[in-house]
Amino acid sequence: MASTEPEHEHREDEEAPANDDEDTGAQVAPIVKLEEVAVTTGEEDETSILDLKAKLYRFDKDGNQWKERGAGSVRFLKHNVSGKVRLVMRQSKTLKICANHLVLPTMTVQEHAGNEKSCVWHATDFADGELKDELFCIRFASIENNKTFMETFQEVAESQNKKEENKDASAAAGLLEMLTVKEKKTEDKAEEEVPVESEKETKIEAEKTEKKDEEPASST
């Protein structure tokens, strides 16, 4: 009679589950070592004045229609040194720049006809790496956000205008100061020259008098 023990033992070996989580103690070194890289955005020296979610459009002159530029955050960034303010908008997912231009004193923004949540303005934009004259339209989720954007836009434009006026006034004041100093120096120089002439004339008159006294008196 044949024994069934080996067959039983073999069956137990087959039914025993494999332990996939068993720690073998092996250490696997990474194939490529990644180093942390500092990313610069060009906004390190700027302070955000306003940050709102919106959707931006540009007017296509060739097609005579509005075309979407992207949806994301529109911000006013003020430079910490120069004080200049630019409008920057990036798309939410890709962070691609869809608007990038300075806010100038000559710029105006107005509500888009028939839509209280939108406004339009002209700008010389640099989003595509070259200066282009663009007509932008931006749409917000609420009327309040649109009003806030327009008010901030106008305040920034007016502040830049005042800055230019102050700059011109400072330059004019500096020029006047230079002219005043120059005129003062001319007057001082003239005052210094006057005594010299007077002293010379006095000396000549004295010499004439002395010579006259030395001449013999005429006989009578």
Image (cartoon, rainbow, N blue to C red):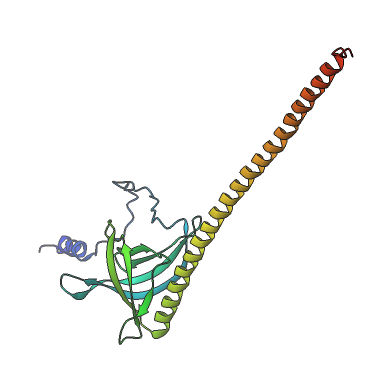
Q: Is residue 47 left or right of residue 131?
A: right
Q: Is residue 103 left or right of residue 193?
A: left
Choose between 2 and 139: the one closer to the eye: 139
The location of residue 128, given as percent across then percent down, is: 26, 59
The location of residue 194, given as percent across then percent down, is: 72, 34
Q: Quadrant of residue 92?
A: bottom left
Choose between 40 and 136: the one closer to the eye: 136
Choose between 214 and 118: the one closer to the eye: 214
Name which residue lies at 55% across and 58% down: 169
The location of residue 153, given as percent across then percent down, is: 43, 72
Farthest residue to the bottom: give it: 114
Q: Quick check: can you spot residue 95?
A: no
220 over 183 or under it: above or below? above
Choose between 199 and 92: the one closer to the eye: 199
Farthest residue to the left: give it: 1
Q: Quadrant of residue 218?
A: top right
Q: Quadrant of residue 141?
A: bottom left
Q: Quick check: can you spot residue 57?
A: yes
Name which residue lies at 87% across and 17% down: 213
The location of residue 157, given as percent across then percent down, is: 44, 68
The quadrant the C terminus occupies is top right
Q: How many callouts does the rendering have?
A: 0
Q: Is residue 129 left or right of residue 206?
A: left
211 over 134 or under it: above or below? above
162 over 146 or under it: above or below? above
The quadrant the N terminus occupies is bottom left
